[in-house]
Amino acid sequence: MKKIEILGTGCPKCKKMAECAEEAARELGIEYDLQKVTDIAEITRHGVMMTPALVVDGKVKVVGKVPSIEELKQLIA
């Protein structure tokens, strides 16, 4: 099971990233656990200074932008 985390404070871009990541994971047909991390201390523990950010299985994959669904599928797979 993939662990997908969306790091962000809940801004529109953060919400869009969560929606797109969930759609990408569904399209891939994989089992996943998607969590939204809004705590600033937790976000900075990942070394992230800009949001939104995508973390897959503990590794930061994207910071500061919302990739396309196709890009997200490659990052999540």
Image (cartoon, rainbow, N blue to C red):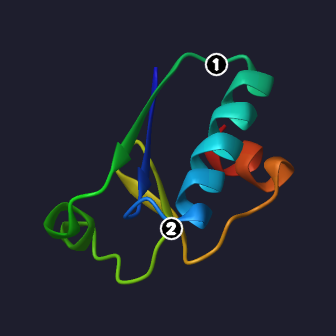
- x 74%, y 63%: residue: 67
Q: Mark 1 points at which residue?
A: 30
Instruction: Please tell me which residue lies in front, 43 or 73.
Output: 43
The correct choice, above or below, for 35 with respect to 48 in the image is above
Q: Mark 2 points at which residue?
A: 52
Q: In the rendered structure, which amino acid carries the disc numbered 1?
A: Ile
Instruction: Please tell me which residue lies in front, 39 or 24.
Output: 39
| Image location of residue 70, percent across then percent down | 85, 49
- x 59%, y 63%: residue: 12
Residue depth check, mark 1 versus mark 2: number of the one nearer the observer: 2
Residue contact at pointers 1 and 2, CB within 8 angstroms: no
Q: In the rendered structure, which amino acid carries the disc numbered 2?
A: Pro
- x 71%, y 45%: residue: 20
Image-based side of 22 in relation to 51, left or right = right
Image-based side of 66 in relation to 54, left or right = right
| Image location of residue 68, percent across then percent down | 82, 57
Image-based side of 8 in relation to 15, left or right = left
| Residue at the far bottom in the pictured view | 49
